[in-house]
Image (cartoon, helix red, strand yellow):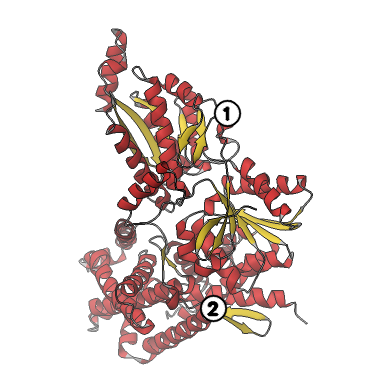
Amino acid sequence: MIDPYYLQQLAIGLSLGMTYALMAIGFTLIFGVLNVVNFAHGEIYTLGAFAGLVLISAAAPPAAAVIFAALAIGALAGFSLERLAFKPFRRFTDEASLKSRAMRESTLLSSLAVSIVVREGLEIGFGSQMQSIPFAYLINTPVRVGPVILVTGDFIIFGVAAAMLVGLQYLLTRTRTGLAIRAVSNNPLGAKYVGIDTDRTIIVTFVVGSMMGAAAGILTGLYYGAVFPAMGFIPGIKAFVAMVMGGLSSIPGAVICALILGIAESMATTFVSSGWSDMVAYGFLIVTLIFFPNGLFGARRERV
Amino acid sequence: MNLRLSGLLAAAATIGLSAAAFADTVKLGYQLPLTGETAQYGQDFRKAAEIALTEFNGSGKPFTVEIIFEDSRSDAKEGTTIARKFVDNKEIVGVLGDFTSGVSMAAAQVYKDAGLPQLSQTASHPDYTKISKYQFRNIATQAQEGPYNAKWMLAKGYKTIAVIAEQTDWGQSVVSGFSEGVKAGGGTVVFSEFFNRGLKDYRSLISKLERAKPDAIYTGFFYEDGAQFLKQVQQLGIKTPVYSTSAAYSPKLLELAGDAAEGVHLTSNFLPTDPSADVQHFVTEWKAKSDGAVPGQFPAQAYDAVRIMLAAVEKAYPNPTREKVRDALAETKDFPGVTGKTSFGPDREAQKELVKVEVKGGAFVPVAD
C-alpha cells in the first residue's frame, strides 16, 4: 500500500506541472515551432491576468466572460508584440540577413525590451502590490479524491491544457494554416517562394500563442487568487525549461516535461529543503543540455 | 551639480566656513526598493516619509529638510552603490533604509567606513546593529520577537512546534530566535525549513510539515507569502494553529487570504485602531493618500523612523554634521511614535513593546494572551 503522503505529493506535483504546461504550450508554439525568440511571453501571461482582473472589478461578469476578455487581450497583445518587436527585423529578406545571427538576436533583445516596458508599465498603473481577485471567482474549492485533496482549479486547468494541446495538434497537422506554420518554421525563405504569406502566418502564430499565454495567466490568477506585475517571470522560466527538455519544437514534449518538472519539484520537497526545490528545474535544464542536446522529445529533425 | 557642490563645500571648508553657513536645507538620504519584487514596501515607505517630511517642513522650523530617495530594488549590489553615492554627497548627514536586512547590512559596511549614520525602519536581523556605531533601527528584532512568541505559544500549551521561514537573512533570524526561545521554554521544534520568497505553491511543504504532526506552526513570512500559505493550509483541510511574526501584519494579508486568515496569531507594534491622537493623525493622512486604505505596520515604521531622524537633525542644528546627527540619534529617549515609544539602548537597538493580535471576523484584534 502506498503511503497516502506520497499520493498527495504526486497529486500536488501533477497540478503544479499542469500550471507550467499551460504556460509552456503557447510559449513553445512561438519560441520553438516558429523558431523565434520571444521573451515577452511571461508579460502576455501577466496581461491576460490583469485583463481578467480589470473586467472582474469593473463589471463582475460571469467567469466565461473573464476568460474571453483575457483571450481577446492576448490576441491583441500577440499582434502588437509581433508588430513592435519582430516585424521590423524582417524587413531584409536577402539571404545574408536571413542567415545572420544578429537578426535573430536582435528580436531576442527587442522582445525583452517590450517585456520590461510592459512590466514596468503595469507597475506604474497598478502598483507592484499583489491584487486580490474576489473570492467568488476563485477556482480553489477543495475536492477530495480518495486519500488526496485537490481543488476544482486542478481539474479546470487540466481540461484547458488538454483542450489547448489537442486543438493545437489539430491546427498544426490537419489545417492549411498549420501546414503554413510548419513550412515557415522549416524554411521561411522557401515558404515565401512557394507563395505562402509568411507575414500573415507569423502573425497568426503569435496571436494563437499569445491567446494561450493570456488564458494561462488568468487561469493561474483565479487559481492562486493573486495577480501582480512580476507574476510571469517564474512560470516563464519553468515553461522555458520544459520547452528545452521537450526538445524546443515539440508541444506534447513540452507538456510532458512540464508535468515531470512539477512532480519532481513536489517530490524533491520531501527529500531536500523546499528552498532548494527550484534547483530541480535548473538541474533538469543542465542535465538535458549535457546528455540530450536535442531534448527528450526532439530527436527527430522535423519540427512540430 | 554634485561635483560643483562638493567643490564649493571643499572651498568653504578651506576658508573656515561651516556647511551650515550657506545651507538652510539639510539633506537626508533614503535608500529603499521603489521597483522590483519588493517595490510595494518601498513605495509605502516613501509615502510615509513624505507625510512626515511635509509635516516637519510645514511646522516653521528655521531650516528645511530634503530627502533624496534612491531605488535599491532590494538588491545588495544596488544598495552599496547607493550607499557610496550618499557618502560622496557631503551634504547628506543621515541615511534611512534599506528595507531588507540583507541590503541594509551590505550598505551598512559603506556607511560604517564613512561614518554616516544609518537608521533602518525594518532591518531586523540581529547582526545589523553590530556592524558599527552608525547603525540604528526602530523595529523589534527577531532576537526579541522570537523568544516573546515562543513564550506565548508555550503558554498556550503547544509543546511541539514546526517552524518555516523565507530563505533570507531575516528568515534565518526568525528561525534561530524562535527556536532558542522554544528550547529555553522546554518545548521542541519538530520541523524547521526555509522556502524561497515568492513561492506560489506551498502545498508540498505543508504536506511535509504536517507529517511531523506539530501542535502549532510558527511562520516567518510577509503578507504575500503568508496569504498563499494560509489559503493552501485551508485548502488541504489542516487545522493546526498558525502563529506569525509582525512582518505578516498588514491589512493586505486579510484581503488576500480572506477567511483562510481567520485564527492566525501574530505580534505587532502598530495598531491603526489605537485611539491616540498621533496614530489617528497618521492613519487619516495615510488614508487621504491611499484611496482610503488603512496603513499596516511597515509604513508606520517608516513614518516613525523618518521622524526620529528629523528630531535628531533638529537637535544637531544649527551645525548638523554626520557625527552630531549620530550622537543625537543615539540619545533618542522615549520618542513618542505611532509604533509606541522608541528608545535606543547602548547597542542602538530599539526597545519596543509588542502587542498580541489575533485575526477574528476578518480583522486584527488585540488579545490578552
For residue B359, say whether it is visible.
yes
Q: Which residue is mark 2?
A: A256
Residue B345, labelled with which disc? Answer: 1
Q: Looking at the picture, does residue B289 appear above or below residue B9? A: below
- Percent x, y of residue A230: 41, 60
Q: Nearer the viewer, residue A11 or A241?
A: A11
Residue kind at label 2, given as amino acid type: Ile
Residue type of the residue flagged with mark 1:
Gly
Mark 1 belongs to chain: B
Q: Quadrant of residue A23?
A: bottom left
Q: Residue furthest bottom?
A: A174
Q: Tag 2, which chain?
A: A
Quadrant of residue B77 within the rendered picture: top left
Q: Quadrant of residue A63?
A: bottom left
Q: Residue furthest top?
A: B15
Give the SS element for disc 1.
loop
Q: Do residues under tags 1 and 2 come within 8 Å of each other at their CB atoms?
A: no
Q: Residue at x 40, y 22 (%)?
A: B315
